[in-house]
Image: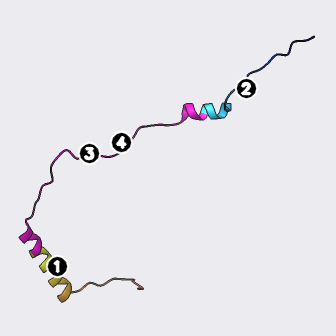
C-alpha cells in the first residue's frame, strides 16, 4: 500500500500575506490631552460690549447674502 502524504494547508493566500507586509501602518492617538489651563482673554463686560456692538451693526447696516436662493 502506498502511504498518503498529508499536506497542511496554509492560512490565507500569498497576496494577503504580501499585502500585510507592505501595508503602511501607524498608530494614532485616541485623543489629545490638554495640559495647559484655559486662559480668559476678555472678561464678561468686554464680551457684552462686543455682542451689543455686533447687534448694532447688524441692525443699522445689515448683511447681504449674495447668490442666496433661500
Label 4 sits on a secondary structure element that is: loop
Q: Which residue is tagged 4?
A: 29
Disc 1 crowd rating (10 Å Cα; few below 14, some 14-19, many 20+) is few
Q: Earlier in the sequence, mark 2 or mark 4?
A: 2
Q: Nearer the viewer, mark 4 or mark 1?
A: 4
Q: Residue at x 20, y 84 (%)?
A: 58
Label 2 sits on a secondary structure element that is: loop
Left or right of 27 on screen, residue 21: right
Q: Residue at x 43, y 37 (%)?
A: 26
Viewport quadrant of the C terminus:
bottom left
Marks 4 and 1, how far apart at CA: 39 Å
Q: Which residue is tagged 1?
A: 54
Task: Indicate the position of residue 56 as horizontal and vertical percent values.
Answer: 15, 84
Magenta-drawn segment: 19-48
Query: Which residue, as the protein is rendered here, is positioned at the far bottom?
Result: 60
Image color mode:
rainbow
Q: Earlier in the sequence, mark 3 or mark 1?
A: 3
Q: Which residue is tagged 2?
A: 9
Amino acid at each position: 500500500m502506498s502511504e498518503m502524504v498529508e499536506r497542511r494547508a496554509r492560512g490565507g493566500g500569498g497576496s494577503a500575506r504580501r499585502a500585510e507586509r507592505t501595508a503602511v501602518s501607524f498608530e494614532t492617538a485616541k485623543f489629545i490631552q490638554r495640559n495647559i489651563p484655559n486662559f480668559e482673554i476678555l472678561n464678561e463686560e468686554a464680551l457684552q460690549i462686543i455682542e451689543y456692538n455686533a447687534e448694532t451693526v447688524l441692525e443699522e447696516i445689515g448683511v447681504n447674502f449674495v447668490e442666496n436662493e433661500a
